[in-house]
Amino acid sequence: MVLANRIVSFLPSATEILYLLECEHLLYGVTHQCNFPAEAKSKPQIIKSVFDSESMTSLQIEDKIQELARLQKEYFTINFALLEKIRPDLIISQGICDVCSPHDREMGRVIRYLGYTPDTLVLDPHTIVDVVQNIVDVAKMVGKENEGLQIKSSLQNRIERIASTIKDENPKVICLEWLDPFYIAGHWVPQMVELAGGVNGISKSGERSRKIELSQILQYDPDIVILLPCGFTLDRARSEYVSLKGNDYWSSLRAVKNNRVFAVDAISFFSRPSPRVITGIEILAKIFNPKPFANLVVPDNSYGSLVKDV
């Protein structure tokens, strides 16, 4: 296999992995969402969104996505001229979600424009096992398989330490990926809940995230609600939660009554299938069982109670 020397990443988590492998010098193009580590923001941006989600509410974003889908228009623009100038020998794309990042279906357009066929690596993780294995998949492409396996082993050890610390408490949990309308989190998030000692409700590991009704949340009546709006920071999640404060049905939930509604920094630790989802599992473990995980260190401002804070 010929090792990659000029890589373009269509996926923020792949960008993170390349930096973790100390291969950032091979990275010649990224997306507008590649913001971790901070140095990645200085890389040439090949991909940009067709709308500014930062200035829009959750409902406005949902309506815009539905409009683009109905009109069969693209969610992203590709700087083909810059891509042609870079002449990548490897493009890393994804098959998870055609809204979050450029989908592998865009590769046909890219290849037609370039006039040659670069190597491609399509990452399509749906479980934590997949997420961790993707590190090795990327590492192989840059000749660092041993380093990738070492990182994989380190992450697995962290998961095992969580499992060995979990006590008998197993709270019923739901994780909401969007609040207006409600979407239940799928893919690797249900497994994150289970690994952290919770009982995941409504969705199953490996399934896609999907729209649900408030009645389904009321019927499950979870002990804990985790709000992780896809691509949102903790502060953004807090601001979105205000819209639910006056909803009497929402207020009747056991989790709301018991002050067990939490927002998390989704974009850093949950939305992206990057190595940092293991930190997300640790965050959930501290939320579900605070006492046994009191000494577990997680990043500041990574999560917070919402019922008391807003």
Image (cartoon, rainbow, N blue to C red):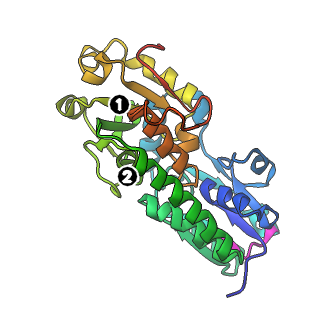
- Within the magenta stretch, is there residue 251? no
Quadrant in which residue 20 is drawn: bottom right
Tell me what residue is drawn at x 58 percent, y 37 percent: 298
Q: Is residue 248 visible?
A: yes
Position of residue 190 relative to residue 262, above or below, is below
* Residues rendered magenta in the picture: 86-91
Mark 2 vs 1, N-terminal side = 2
Q: Nearer the viewer, residue 17 or 193?
A: 193
Position of residue 136 relative to residue 223, above or below, is below
Query: Dot 1, how many residues are within 10 Å of its Cα: few (below 14), some (14-19), or many (20+)?
Result: many
Q: Is residue 108 visible?
A: no
Please state the horizontal and vertical placement of residue 113, each as a whole percent of the image: 68, 72
Query: Dot 2, how many residues are within 10 Å of its Cα: few (below 14), some (14-19), or many (20+)?
Result: many
Q: Are marks 2 and 1 in contact (CB under 8 Å)?
A: no
Q: Which residue is mark 2?
A: 191
Tell me what residue is drawn at x 67 percent, y 88 percent: 1
| Three-letter amino acid code of the residue under disc 1 | Val
Tell me what residue is drawn at x 57 percent, y 35 percent: 53
Residue with the most extreme bottom position: 1
| Three-letter amino acid code of the residue under disc 2 | Gln
Look at the numbered disc 2 and give the secondary structure of its residue.
Answer: helix
Please state the horizontal and vertical placement of residue 64, each as a whole percent of the image: 48, 38
Please state the horizontal and vertical placement of residue 99, each as a whole percent of the image: 49, 50
Q: Which residue is mark 1?
A: 225
Tell me what residue is drawn at x 39 percent, y 34 percent: 289
